[in-house]
Amino acid sequence: MCMIGDDDCGWTNLGQTIRCARKRHRCYECSRTIEPGERYEDARGVGDGRVTVMRSCAHCIAARSWLDAVCRGYLWGGVWDDLQQHWDEEWSLRTLDLGRVMVWHRRRWIDPATGDLVDPRLIKEITRRAAQVASAVVAEAERKTREYWAAERAARTARYEQTFGAA
């Protein structure tokens, strides 16, 4: 249930850069405050006739890599809705790693054991592992679908030839 295919807003990307915050910003994805000194992504684009600036914290950048790998993209502001939808509707994509990332997100990236922010590099590694599992599951499902339709096509051809004779 990838939301990336539902995008019809006519968004034009004007550029994305990784920056170090000099002042506080609000993350566009998780709404956490990006503190001075933290790295974040600054993305600008035109949609609905106006320029929009979206800033994403390093944690959300790392977490959305799952969508990049599995869905081949993501929608700005829809990363967590899309991940939640995958979690709720596709049981075969549920992994402990993806679950950990989603729980950390709900807790604003605070590790309950230490009370500190989770290291974005750890999130990146965990989502990479979860994406590998999910990509393998998706590839297997696609392979089975192709095999099913090839067998269905062969059966239909055989029935046609049996009914009407070989061409």
Image: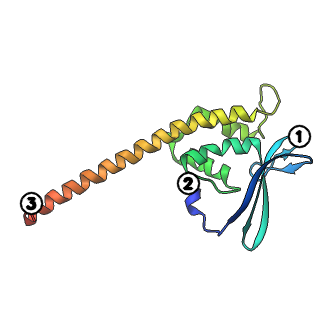
Colour scheme used in the picture? rainbow
Mark 1 residue type: Gly
User: What's the mark number on residue 2?
Assistant: 2
What quarter of the picture does the C terminus occupy? bottom left
Q: Which residue position is annotated with label 3?
A: 162
Question: At 74% from the left edge and 41% from the top edge, which residue is drawn?
Answer: 59
The amino acid type of the residue labelled 3 equals Gln
Question: Considering only order in the chain, which callout, 3 or 1, is on the residue closer to the N terminus?
Answer: 1
In the depicted view, which residue is nearer to us: 152 or 15?
Answer: 15
The answer to whether residue 135 is seen in the rendering is: yes
User: Where is 120 relative to 152, above or below?
Assistant: above
Disc 2 is placed on an element classified as: loop
Residue 110 position in % (x across, y down): 79, 34
Crowd rating for badge 3 (residues with CA inside 10 Å; few <14, some 14–19, many 20+):
few
Name the residue at 76% across, 32% down.
119
Give the residue number, with chain letter if any, for mark 1. 37
The secondary structure type at the circle numbered 3 is: helix
What residue do we see at 77% from left, 31% from top? 111
